[in-house]
Image (cartoon, rainbow, N blue to C red):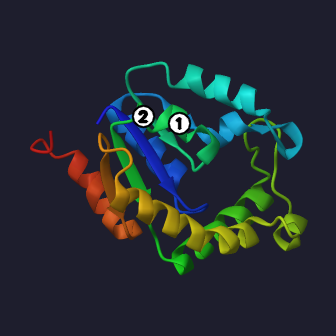
Amino acid sequence: MKRIVVVGTSGSGKTTLARKLAERCGCPHVELDALHWEPGWQEAPPDVFRERLIAALAGDAWVADGNYQKVRDLIWPRADTLLWLDYPLTVVLCRIFRRTVSRIFTREMLWGTNQEHLGALFRRDSILLWVLRTYRRRQREYRVLFEGAPYPHLTMIRLRSPRETDRWLAALTRPDYR
């Protein structure tokens, strides 16, 4: 595993897992959200996003996280491993709620100058509603990708719970793993 992609619905823990993996592997962590979002929650223009991503993936080893289908053609062909965090909706909703509330109260800065605000929890573009709208679609999409194997060179690993992910990650540190 030298070039790893971590996917899953929003709030599943992609960035947290990718950060841990990058640290263990001693390689860069490429967070797609950080390359995608501009100040004021504006999306980077597609060509700018793609250029940033090409530069970030230039090395021989990296761990990337994110679900951006519009740049999948840049990531997946270069990757050797795909991790799918396929957690139950209840787990994801609890995580996203806790994470969002924590970010609101700590005023955590996201990708430069963006912050989450309490009012954003109740708007039509709320992250909670986004998860509810996209959860089933993501499951169907990744199930098809895993079963159809349009990227036969990828080692595909489906992790169905945080506990299973923790066990898998712990196994990486065993001397007999490699």
Q: Are marks 2 and 1 in contact (CB under 8 Å)?
A: yes
State which quadrant residue 114 falls in. top right
Q: Residue furthest bottom?
A: 90
Instruction: Left or right? Give the position of 122 relative to 61.
Output: right
Instruction: Left or right? Give the position of 51 relative to 173.
Output: right
Q: Residues within 10 Å of mark 1 (few under 14, many from 20)?
A: few
Residue 100 against residue 4 in the figure, above or below: below
Q: Residues within 10 Å of mark 2 (few under 14, many from 20)?
A: few
Residue 85 against residue 83 in the figure, above or below: below
User: Which residue is identified by label 1?
Assistant: 73
Q: As shown in the figure, which amino acid type bears the numbered disc 2?
A: Pro
Tell me residue 166's x, y (percent). 33, 60
Residue 134 against residue 146 in the figure, above or below: below
Identify which residue, 107 or 132, lies in the foreground: 132
Q: Residue at x 78, y 61 (%)?
A: 105
Measure the alpha-carbon separation of dots 2 and 1: 7 Å
On-image quarter of the N terminus = top left
State which quadrant residue 32 falls in. top right
On-image quarter of the C terminus = top left
User: Which residue is identified by label 2?
Assistant: 77
Instruction: Left or right? Give the position of 56 relative to 176.
Output: right
Circle 1 sits in a helix, a strand or a loop, which is it?
A: helix
Identify which residue, 170 or 76, lies in the foreground: 76
Q: As shown in the figure, which amino acid type bears the numbered disc 1?
A: Asp
Instruction: Left or right? Give the position of 40 relative to 87.
Output: right
Q: Residue at x 89, y 42 (%)?
A: 40
